[in-house]
Amino acid sequence: MNLTKYILLALVAGVIVGIVATFIPEAYFSPVNEWVLVPLGKIFINLIKMLVVPIVFCSITMGVFQLGDPRKVGKMGGRTLLFFLCTTAIAICVAMVLALLIQPGHVPGLEPLAAAPSFEETPSMMDNLLGIIPDNPVASMAQGNMLQIIFFAVLFGIGISLLGNKSQTVKNFITETNDVLMKIINIVMYTAPFGAFALITSAIGSNGAETLRQMGMYVLVVLLALGVHFFFTYGTTLRVWGKMSLIDFVKKFYPAMVVGFSTSSSNATLPISMEVAQEKLKVPAPISSFVQSLGSTINMDGTAIMQGVATVFVAQVYGIDLTMGQIIMVIITAVLASIGTAGVPAVGLVMLVMVFNQVGLPVEGIGLIIGIDRILDMVRTSVNITGDAICAVIMTRVEERSDAKLAKKSQ
Ligand code: ASP
């Protein structure tokens, strides 16, 4: 919580200094920007970028082998995965549609930022899809080709689970490497207050206070999309398959949501959300532990929403029109990115780099959203854990129905 306080302080300080900077003559601000703020911001962004490839590889491999032997996952495993994938895809679509309609990155009177990459260099969607199988996975990692890395990681994870106990050493290695990477994220986050301050001051100081309006619009669209997904997608699925109203659900589940909000970590909230689901929502323990623990590692609807809005927002800020192919690519990569996002604070932002890389957006654009991400992380984590619990309730009803059917048949 202390670090959060510092990041928020840095955000406020960055806004104030940035606004003051707009009144200072260009000749004074420019050198400070060029020699202090831009390098500080760059250091922070590079520290994040550095972690993307190893984290994507380890977390996706882990996500796959944690599922267990594909031959044994069974019907409930399949249904749970399907539910997770569909709700996450819906979440991104909601986010992108709202961002495309509201256009948080287009503020009248604000020129698009430079540094737009040339799209001739960005491969078409077909090339992307065909090129998903790497001819050399080490080269894919060196080049940061995310889809190829994910493809290899999924196969690697499947191989590990098929080998069972024989692959225990590799399993431990990947799990421990992942823990080490999470520790490094913790360390990197200590530089976040400086990075956030420098990036925000630089953005406002060089582009004017209107940038603030842009950032405010971004926050509003993310919150709106989270709200729509929560009330509409969750409300409907819960009513139709879970035979429960969202209000009844929230009345029982809110203690876990509050913990998710205050810790910004699905993993840290897991024990509480499982307890609440089992005690108050009456989800049987085996279903709750399978669905919710899997969900806390791979099901991140709130994170996907942030990534969807952020991608459209940054494209708009840089005056880039996303093609249909790129939009589909964002949906695919953001589903995968949210699977790869670990349930700890701020990882969603690291994974956003992967989505940007995939569609050729300037990673520097993250500077515009980094300061406020801490607050949004709290809200999206609550949504993340709610999605897992709703899935657990639905799986309970589905099992009850199939048990009832079996009982009827045997009579
Ligand atoms: N903090 C989120 C979670 O734990 C992940 C993220 O979006 O950064 O669910």
Image (cartoon, rainbow, N blue to C red):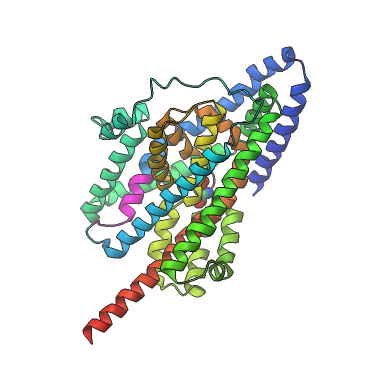
- 222 or 141, which is in the foreground? 222
Q: Is residue 193 above or below residue 255?
A: above
Residue ID at (27%, 31%): 131
Q: Quadrant of the C terminus?
A: bottom left
Residue found at the very far bottom of the displayed protein: 411
Q: Position of residue 387 (x, y in %)?
A: 47, 58
Residue extending furthest front?
101
In this orientation, which residue lies closer to the viewer: 44 or 304? Answer: 304
Question: Which x, y percent locates residue 339?
Answer: 40, 48
Q: Residue at x 45, y 60 (%)?
A: 388
Residues shaded magenta = 59-70
- Residue 374 seen: no
Image: 210 above or below 171? above
Q: Is residue 65 magenta?
A: yes
Q: Is residue 208 above or below residue 51?
A: above
In reply to whether residue 296 is colored magenta, the answer given is no
Residue 244: x percent and y percent? 48, 71
Q: Main secondary structure of the magenta part?
A: helix
Determine which quarter of the picture holds residue 248.
Answer: bottom right
Q: Residue at x 27, y 82 (%)?
A: 407
In the picture provided, is 43 more to the left or to the right than 88? right
Residue at x-position 46% and y-position 32%:
356
Q: What x and y, as percent, mark residue 279? A: 50, 74
| Side of 182 where 213 appears, left or right | right
Task: Choose between 186 and 388: the one closer to the eye.
Answer: 388
